[in-house]
Image: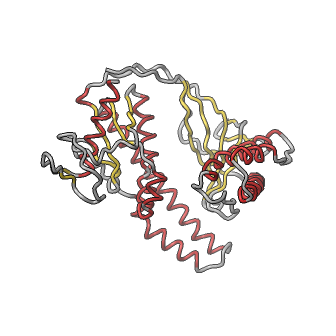
Amino acid sequence: MMTTKYEKNDFRIHEYPIYPTNVQQNLLAARFDQEDSAYNTLAGHVNQSYSQGAGLEELKALVQNHPIPTENEVDHFAITQVRKRIISLLPRLCSGKITCIKLRRTDRSQRSARYHYVGISDYHLVLPVIGSIAMEQHRDLPKGARIYGATVYADCYHAFYHVALHLIVPQQPVDPVPIHYSKVVGLDYAQDGLYVDSSGHCAGYPAFRHQAQDKLNRCHRAANRFKTGSRRWRKFRQRAAKIERHVVNQRKDWQYKQAHALAQQYDAVCVETLDLAGMMQNEPALSGKLCDNAPAAFYKRLEQVLNAQGKRLIRVDRYYPSSQICSACGRKVGKLPMDSAFTCPYCGLSLDRNHNAARNIREEGLRQMEQ
């Protein structure tokens, strides 16, 4: 049996719709423009310096030292967040994962601005400079929660606004649940259904994005028939953005329900660490499925639910060859095609590829717990 020490503070994000007035919308648009302008300025200098042979440390110094005028503390915080975002992209740029830092377009589907000092009062969000904005607080904040920042988003071409409150929630110490080996399950990622567990059960993810793809294509085709920026173009782009939001909400709701079901049934869940960027690069055809399934987000939510109940999520190293080992005799067979069943030439085991990998992931997770 294993024991785990849990943190006393939990970091959460609660999202609420907000309804700014026309004047407040103009102030928010000015704030979006300010952050986008600073981002594009820094990105342009970084791309130019990188093309001239500058290294990682030189680029970091350039981002930190490049002067961007600020009038008050609110603007200074916004520029600081922009610098952090640019610096986070520099390792990917220098390693060749991206060719350049793309500039932000003003006509993109979502714009955002980060605030450090915010407050809520009587179903209103209070922001510096902007003032009090009507907010639909459909759920209360957790007891003892403290707001340490917020991000305001303008979605659907400024037809929908919402705020993401960044919270620090004090947590009572959770006693670790004794882990019984019969209540440990392994999950292997599957393109169809999100995952297959070590019992052979497929989660059966409904692929909400795939279901809505025809509606999205119709909206985009209709928008392309009109001039960019026109009223009708904006109308169909708003419809497409609304469908996208609905798909995201459907996926999040399904994943949380699945995570609670697993946490109720098992004491520990073993999953494989996925190299999503590498999978997309090596197999571009899988990108659509990977984005629709969102396995990384599911594992993060599953870990959050398990930790809240004193249970464990065990991550198996990405280089562990779970799909190449026979779960019956333990011998390594080698790489197999993605759509093939697993057949062991040594002991004759014939099993679904994902089911066999899930059993191996469970055994590796149990081995890690015993260390």
Residue 149 % position (x, y): 67, 37
Q: Is residue 151 above or below residue 229?
A: above
Q: Is residue 348 above or below residue 145?
A: below
Left or right of 68, for residue 206:
left
Q: Residue at x 37, y 40 (%)?
A: 259
Query: Which quadrant would the N terminus be assigned to in this image?
Result: top left
Residue 197 % position (x, y): 27, 43
Residue 70 % position (x, y): 85, 45
Q: Which of the 4 image quadrants contains residue 265?
A: top left
Query: Which quadrant would the C terminus be assigned to in this image?
Result: top left
Left or right of 76, for residue 318:
left
Q: Foreground residue, 326 or 225? A: 326
Q: Residue at x 28, y 56 (%)?
A: 336
Q: Is residue 190 above or below residue 15?
A: below
Q: Residue furthest front?
A: 53
Q: Residue at x 75, y 44 (%)?
A: 78
Left or right of 205, for residue 53:
right
